[in-house]
Image (cartoon, rainbow, N blue to C red):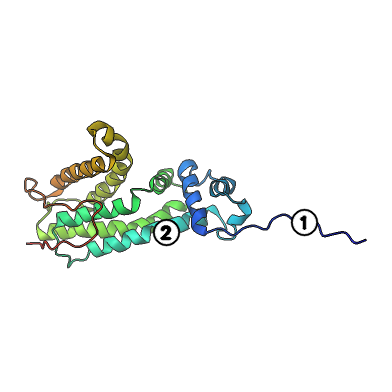
Amino acid sequence: MPHAPRPRGPKPIRMDPDRILDAAQEVFARDGLRAASLRAIAKQAGCDPALIYYHFDSKEAMFTALLARRFPPILQELEVVAEPGDPRSTALRLWEVVRIYHRHLKADPAIRSLIRGEIVRGAEGLSSLIEVRIRPIVMAIRSILDQGISRGDLRADLHTLLGTFFLARMHLEILDLLPTVLPRLMGLPHDQAVETGLHVWFDLYWRGIARDPLAPLPPLPELAADPIATKETHP
């Protein structure tokens, strides 16, 4: 009597690649890319480790996909703000940079931790992958600062590359600190505390780079407002 075929177990179930990337992002942020394992990523995603290979052949491939998923939308919005023909004042354009970062990264502490951690660790090959994605963003913000000097809005002696670094880096740090610290210190609801804190920080940053630090800032749109160009024009 012939034997019935032995069951081989359930076939792997295909999974949305974004779910795997979400899991990889959490594990990379927690453990670092070098120490992270495919088994840990699979556990976080709730799938078999073999399933990951349907979509990604290595941890580095997942890291590259995470960068490709996150940075192009940020760059696209920044390049619009950096157009030389943008009529808004330099202060409003830089505030829009803050709002772009806030929209894309405020609810994503894992990607902030991941990028910051891998830059500090300096893993061979990974820093260059990050640089490829970050450099165009840096250049877009720097262009706004360079234009601000040409327009007479900013100090002529401003080091625009360092000005870019402090705008972007400090804002990332603030995104990690404000939601935790300010609601308790100020006794305000979470969103209101973050909005107030970012306005105060931006005012301090602006007065350090402005040609006339005593001139009042124009009204700044709320962080959550739609990214619609203001009608204010540069004088």
The residue sitting at 9% across, 46% down in the picture is: 213
* Residue tagged 1: 7
Residue 119 falls left or right of residue 182: right
Q: Label 2: how many residues lie within 10 Å, few (<14), some (14-19) or many (20+)?
A: few
Q: Secondary structure at mark 2?
A: helix
Nearest to N terminus: mark 1 or mark 2: 1
Q: What's the mark number on residue 69?
A: 2
Q: Could you say which quadrant of the image residue 233 lies in? A: bottom left
x and y percentages locating residue 97 in the rendered image: 24, 55
Decide: few, some or many residues near mark 1? Use Cα within 10 Å; few <14, some 14-19, many ≥20.
few
- Looking at the picture, how far across and down is residue 107, in whole percent? 36, 48
State which mark lies toward you, 1 or 2: 1
Q: What's the amino acid at mark 1?
A: Pro
Q: Farthest top residue?
A: 185
Residue type pointed to by label 2: Arg
Q: Nearer the viewer, residue 138 or 89?
A: 89
Q: Is residue 54 left or right of residue 24?
A: right
The reply to whether discs 1 and 2 touch (Cβ–Cβ < 8 Å) is no
Q: Quadrant of the C terminus?
A: bottom left
What residue is shown at x 32% (from left), y 61% (from top)?
75
